[in-house]
Image (tube, rainbow, N blue to C red):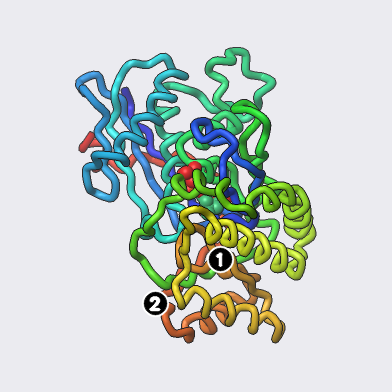
Amino acid sequence: MLPFTALAHPNIAFIKYWGNRNEILRLPANGSISMNLDGLDTRTTVQFDNSLAADVVRINGKFSNGGEQVRVSKFLDQVRILANLRLFAHVESENNFPSGAGIASSASAFAALALAASRAAGLEISPDREETSNLDKDFDQMALSRLARRGSGSACRSIPGGYVEWLAGTSDMDSYAISIAPPGHWDLVDCIAMVSTGQKNTGSSEGHALAGTSLLQASRVEDAPRRLEICRRAILERDFTNLAEIIEEDSNLMHAVMMSSHPPLFYWLPATMAVILAVREARSQGLQACYTIDAGPNVHVICTAAVADETSRMLTGIPGVREIRTARVGGPARLVQNPSTRQDEI
Ligand code: DP6
């Protein structure tokens, strides 16, 4: 069968996904909102092959085994079921950014894998659900987002483009992400203050499972519709003041849950706190910048494009900040031409 290559961007959550109602289906405790990160990409090629006795997975040039391989194979099982296919696959995936350090590599990884694997398995993506007659093959963007969600929750938000909301839903069928505004709607920039490039100690999947052990999680989840509404509105109205306040509150709430779980999860380093304080101080002086932090020590500083250079300069001067990466608002997951070398390889 033919190889297919897909590209997807990671995303940074403004309103966070933390905790599942259903761990297997990855049905989240609450809805979430994010921005795709342009210029940071995962490229994944998938080819089903009848000569294989197992899936062969290569990530960033290294053959995977153990947990990583099992997670990809389990995901491919979903695709095989949907496509009624019994073949194993070659999977080759590359990131142009470090994995496991607070830039959600699992999001872009499973979004790219969902698109490449579904196409390689012969499933079609139709932009218009209504007109698709064969429902088994009705593989539109919502279905793709639902599929990506099964690999990694946040991956469902890397399928549509721009500013994206993951509707928590009530079941597998209605838990998927939609675009709430295209990339060009508002020129925000994520200046990622890298304070560490090492792998985090506790991965998100383990962390989600601990969320319910915090006394604070129930309140965080109960209040989520309010935060989602404020965030959605701030994006649609390009209201930076409201966006900044709600993003920081939501990030603080998630980290409060993490820190009060059993066992507690501490993702921050001293430099993380230094960046938080510097960003808040700069905003009080008028800089349109605010922070949000995922399950790692690096700080995503969201600012308007007009002040991105100034924000990067300010961050560079903070002790403990090693490097700044910037990303504008990214588009959707998409198919790309197969590089000929890679096609020869598989
Ligand atoms: C803190 O999507 O990485 O980045 O579904 O287990 O792969 P799995 O978790 P993942 O969790 C992301 C958690 C977060 C917040 C967010 O992106 O919403």
Query: Any mark on residue 271, and which?
Result: none
Q: Quadrant of the N terminus?
A: top left
Q: Is there CB contact under 8 Å for labels 1 and 2?
A: no
Q: Quadrant of residue 187?
A: bottom right
Report if the beta carbon of the residue with label 2 is closer than 8 angstroms to ligand 1.
no
Residue that numbered label 1 is attached to: 190
- Mark 1 against mark 2, which lies toward the viewer? 2
Q: Is residue 195 visible?
A: yes
Residue at figure coordinates x 65%, y 24% from the top left? 129
The residue type indicated by label 1 comes to Asp
Tell me where residue 20 appears, x and y as whole percent: 57, 40
Residue that numbered label 2 is attached to: 322
Mark 1 or mark 2, earlier in chain: 1
- The reply, left or right, for residue 175 in relation to residue 87 is right
The residue type indicated by label 2 comes to Arg
Element marked by disc 1: strand
- The reply, left or right, for residue 157 in relation to residue 205 is right
Question: Which residue is at the front of the view, 175 or 295?
Answer: 295
Q: Quadrant of the C terminus?
A: top left
Residue at figure coordinates x 62%, y 53% from the top left? 215
Question: Which residue is at the front of the view, 226 or 83?
Answer: 226
Residue at figure coordinates x 68%, y 75% from the top left? 288
